[in-house]
Amino acid sequence: MIESANDAAPVIAEYVAGSEPAFVEMMNQKAAELGCTGTHFANTHGLHDEEHYTTARDLAKIMMAALEYEKFQEIYSADRYTLAATNLQEERILVTTNYLIDASITSDYYDERVIGGKTGFTTPAGRCVMCVAESGNLRYLCVVLGASSTGADGSTYFGSFVSASEALDFGFDSFTFAEVLSPLAPIAQLPVAHATQSVVVTPAESVTTMLPKDYDKSLLSTRYQLTSEAGLDAPLEAGQAVGVVQEYYGSWDKPILSQ
């Protein structure tokens, strides 16, 4: 992964599955399990094939799944790796192709917020990169596909890195986390059948979500749906779940969270 040595992929495939086609079948099965609806693999090495394709959304799903493994996190964040000497070769140092995390070859694309990622390139696909970046309390997964590989003067150009940094600028500059539900802020006071008193319903816990940095609190609205269409009925216990609460922002037609 560090130097994009895709010739290792078929070797690994044969070791794991017995053959590359068998491993490709496993890849497609796993992609389907992850909910990748626009992806189909035809090989393990990633070179162009009309039957080998994916989408930015699907790659994000695959990356999120891979990040659950500590070993993957270690590899995708490494900027170099030392291969020990053998009886055939001297010690070698592999240097990453991801210039977002390493400035030793060129500092033109280095971005201190990026903590790891993976590059990709074929002529039909263009410059591609998936990366993870952190700043403050925000972490973004960024996927760039089909970026330019040639500069205006005909020189080699990594448009994927430029686009990734621009997208990250927008994300970090435009959004923040905000508390929108709190156990200290009641949602409603509701009657209870077969009881002499009403009850106050509140969120089970404090909930934060991502919103524009300049969001207007007056545009936040709360809706709730009781579990029982008949309403609340005694007896009730403190802390008992009685429904689902959803928070909306402005004219967005989908809830920004549901608890």
Image (spheres, rainbow, N blue to C red):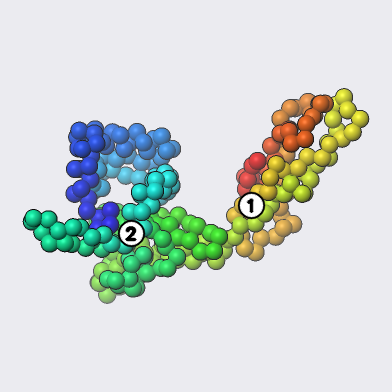
Quarter holding residue 217: bottom right
Which residue in the structure is indicated by mark 1?
208
Disc 2 marks which residue?
Answer: 78
Is residue 121 visible to us here?
A: no
Q: Is residue 126 left or right of residue 142?
A: left
Indicate whether 72 appears above or below 37. Answer: below
Q: Residues within 10 Å of mark 2 (few under 14, many from 20)?
A: some
Mark closest to the chain's N terminus, 1 or 2: 2
**Which residue is drawn at the image coordinates 65% and 64% (left, top)?**
214
| Element type where label 2 sits in the image | loop
Tell me: residue 176, above or below residue 15: below
Query: Label 1: few (<14), some or many (≥20) within 10 Å?
Result: some
Residue drawn at 33 percent across, 59 percent down:
78
Residue drawn at (55%, 60%), measured in percent from left and top? 137
Q: Position of residue 60 (x, y in %)?
A: 42, 48
Q: Percent position (x, y) of residue 118?
A: 33, 55
Q: Quadrant of the C terminus?
A: top right
Residue 202 visible in image:
yes
Seen at 75% across and 27% down, the residue is 229
Residue at the outermost bottom position? 153
